Amino acid sequence: QVSCLFPLKRRPLMGTTVRNTVKARRTVRAMASIGFLSLLLGSMASCGRAQLMIPLPKFPDCWGAPPESADGWGGDIIVLAGGYGYGRKELSAWILQEMQQDKVARHVQYPPAFGKQPRMMTKDYVPLPFGYGHGSGTIRTWLVLKAKQFYDVSPEQYEAAEAVHEI
């Protein structure tokens, strides 16, 4: 039986015994074999009033950490700017702010999970998705494919969220 990973009340710490060590190893093996999300959902169901927490995506290092208000809970979960997946409106606003600072510095950065951008690009000038402005059609195609691959989001979903929430 898996104990609650995110209890709402503080539990006393268990002593370091062989039994607890074995239980911890079993928990880690279970996390690896059935996937962390499945374990998280199962353990939260046993907790009663726990909430599903979406992990924050990795951002460029120079951006630092998002403000605490951006990763808290409450409010709507929307498609984030930059193709970073899903999160709160405040997180999307922070991403847009960081993207704007990058544009001013003439150093546009894409999600680190996407890897390196394509080297060879077409010389066309098209609107880019997810709030990136304008650029090559090659970059547009690359952004759309990578956002779908890593975060399962599309430009259409972002545009719909932007229209509704006025990010």
Image: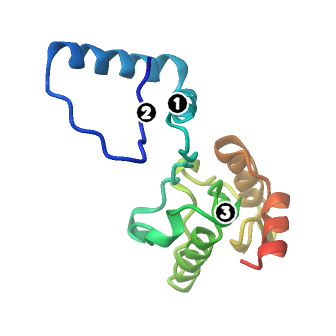
What amino acid type should be assigned to the residue bearing mark 2? Cys
Residue at 48% over, 60% down: 59
Farthest bottom residue in view = 104
Q: Which mark is residue 46?
A: 1
The mark lying in front, picked from 3 and 2, is: 2
Residue at 62% over, 57% down: 84
Q: Which mark is residue 80?
A: 3
Q: How dense is the environment of label 1, judged by Cα within 10 Å: few (below 14), some, or many (20 and up)?
A: some
Q: Nearer the viewer, residue 111 or 105?
A: 111
Q: Quadrant of the C terminus?
A: bottom right
Q: Which residue is mark 2?
A: 4
Q: Nearer the viewer, residue 46 or 67?
A: 46
Q: How dense is the environment of label 3, judged by Cα within 10 Å: few (below 14), some, or many (20 and up)?
A: many
- The Cα–Cα distance between marks 1 and 2, rounded to whole angstroms, is 6 Å
Check disc 2 and report its element: helix, strand or loop.
Answer: loop
Q: From this view, report whether residue 148 is shown above or below residue 16.
A: below
- 50 vs 139, left or right, is left
Q: Position of residue 143 (x, y in %)?
A: 70, 55
Q: Are marks 3 and 2 in contact (CB under 8 Å)?
A: no
What amino acid type should be assigned to the residue bearing mark 3? Leu
Q: Which mark is residue 101?
A: none
Q: Position of residue 137 (x, y in %)?
A: 79, 61
Q: Position of residue 134 (x, y in %)?
A: 75, 74
What amino acid type should be assigned to the residue bearing mark 1? Ser
Check disc 1 and report its element: helix, strand or loop.
Answer: helix
Q: Are marks 1 and 2 in contact (CB under 8 Å)?
A: yes
Q: Earlier in the sequence, mark 1 or mark 2?
A: 2
- The Cα–Cα distance between marks 3 and 1, rounded to whole angstroms, is 31 Å
Q: Earlier in the sequence, mark 3 or mark 2?
A: 2
Q: From this view, report whether residue 86 is shown above or below residue 13.
A: below
